[in-house]
Image (cartoon, helix red, strand yellow):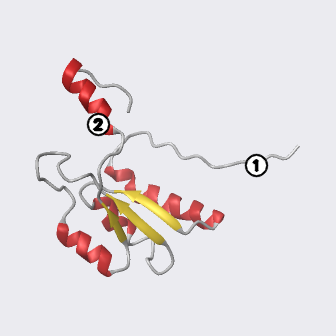
């Protein structure tokens, strides 16, 4: 019988302090599997700033996904525009779009006052 053993890392506490190690572990695994397309969530840009130190845009196709505009308030964009321009100029991609499945959940929350799965 064929069997593979994999390493799993669990953090004892949540938070931004885990970002750099998480990115390094992701790069290590991507390299092991030959993965070059990397998608990274980043709300205010902190994760993006760390990720560009680890993932070279010449070697990886990195796409940073931000919150949609208006997520925290009407017309508000949490991801800094100057950072977006910097990332794009260095060869990274930045995606900001609607949350495809949040509309139904939001409608229930507004009508009934509770959260459900999206």
> Please, is residue 63 above or below residue 1 in the view?
below
Query: In the image shown, does 78 or 75 lie closer to the viewer?
Result: 75
How many angstroms separate mark 1 from mark 2 (CA)? 41 Å
Q: Quadrant of residue 114?
A: top left
Coordinates of residue 67 in the picture (x, y in percent): 27, 52
The residue shown at (29%, 50%) is 98
The residue shown at (63%, 49%) is 7
Determine whether, in the image, residue 23 is placed left or right of residue 81: right
Q: Quadrant of residue 90?
A: bottom left
**Mark 1 surroundings: few (<14), some (14-19) or many (≥20) residues within 10 A:** few
Residue identifier under label 1: 4
Q: Quadrant of residue 39?
A: bottom left
Query: In the image shown, does 20 or 81 lie closer to the viewer?
Result: 81
Query: SS for tag 1?
Result: loop
Residue identifier under label 2: 103
Query: Looking at the image, is mark 1 or mark 2 nearer the viewer?
Result: 2
> Please, is residue 41 above or below residue 112 in the view?
below
> Please, is residue 104 above or below residue 89 in the view?
above
> Please, is residue 79 above or below residue 8 in the view?
below
Coordinates of residue 2 in the picture (x, y in percent): 85, 47
The residue shown at (51%, 59%) is 26
Coordinates of residue 78 in the picture (x, y in percent): 19, 55
* Contact flag, marks 1 and 2 (Cβ < 8 Å): no
Query: SS for tag 2?
Result: helix
Coordinates of residue 36 in the picture (x, y in percent): 55, 69
Query: In the image shown, does 78 or 8 lie closer to the viewer?
Result: 78
Quarter of the image that includes the N terminus: top right
């Amino acid at each position: 019988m064929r069997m593979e053993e994999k390493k799993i890392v669990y953090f004892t506490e949540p938070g931004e302090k885990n970002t750099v190690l998480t990115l390094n572990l992701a790069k290590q695994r991507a390299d092991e599997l030959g993965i070059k397309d990397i998608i990274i969530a980043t709300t205010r840009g902190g994760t993006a700033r760390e990720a560009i130190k680890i993932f070279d845009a010449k070697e990886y196709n990195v796409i940073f996904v931000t919150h949609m505009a208006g997520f925290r308030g009407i017309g508000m964009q949490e991801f800094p525009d100057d950072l977006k321009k910097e990332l794009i100029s260095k060869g990274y991609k930045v995606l900001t779009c609607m949350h495809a499945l949040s509309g139904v959940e939001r409608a229930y929350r507004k009508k009934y006052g509770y959260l459900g799965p999206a």
